[in-house]
Amino acid sequence: MWHVILLGFLGGLLAGNAFPHLASGITRRRYPSALGNGPVTNFVGGWVLSVLAALCLWWADLPSHPGPAFASVSAGVLLIGLFHAGPGAFGRPEPRPAPTPEPGSAR
């Protein structure tokens, strides 16, 4: 049963991490990636992560223990999603506040 939990968790992490890279690549936007920040490298990286996730989930034999499998895959996707929503791979700079106009100046 431990192989189901570990491979399921790893598969969930990989699948959840693949999504922002695939989406960035398809929409031609730059996004931090270990291979480069461009859209093509992000798409290829997301594709590789998707393939590795599928292999992990296949090797996990999820139907043998459906409850723990569901929990571990869900936890993996949740954790990587919180990671991307929070600090991200390379951290995120704090947004600068909008400049306030000086009194008496025209817009």
Image (cartoon, rainbow, N blue to C red):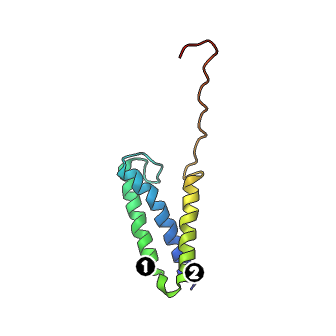
Q: Does 73 appear above or below 80?
A: below
Element carrying mark 1:
helix
Q: Which mark is residue 91?
A: none
Query: Label 2 belongs to which residue?
Result: 68
Residue at the spot x=64%, y=15% of the render? 103
Quote the CA–CA distance across marks 1 and 2.
15 Å
Question: What residue type is disc 1 on?
Answer: Trp
Q: Residues within 10 Å of mark 2 (few under 14, many from 20)?
A: some
Residue 100 left/right relative to 4: right
Residue at the spot x=44%, y=61% of the render? 18
Percent x, y of residue 101? 60, 20
| Residue at the bottom extreme, as displayed | 64
Residue at the spot x=53%, y=85% of the render? 65
Name the quadrant containing residue 92.
top right
Element carrying mark 2:
helix
Percent x, y of residue 5? 56, 79
What is the quadrant of the N terminus in the image?
bottom right
Residue at the spot x=52%, y=66% of the render? 13
Q: Residues within 10 Å of mark 1 (few under 14, many from 20)?
A: some
Between marks 1 and 2 in the image, the one whose residue lies nearer the viewer: 2
Query: Label 1 belongs to which residue?
Result: 58
Residue 38 left/right relative to 5: left
Question: What residue type is disc 2 on?
Answer: Pro
Give the mark nearer the N terminus: 1 vs 2. Answer: 1
Name the quadrant containing residue 68.
bottom right
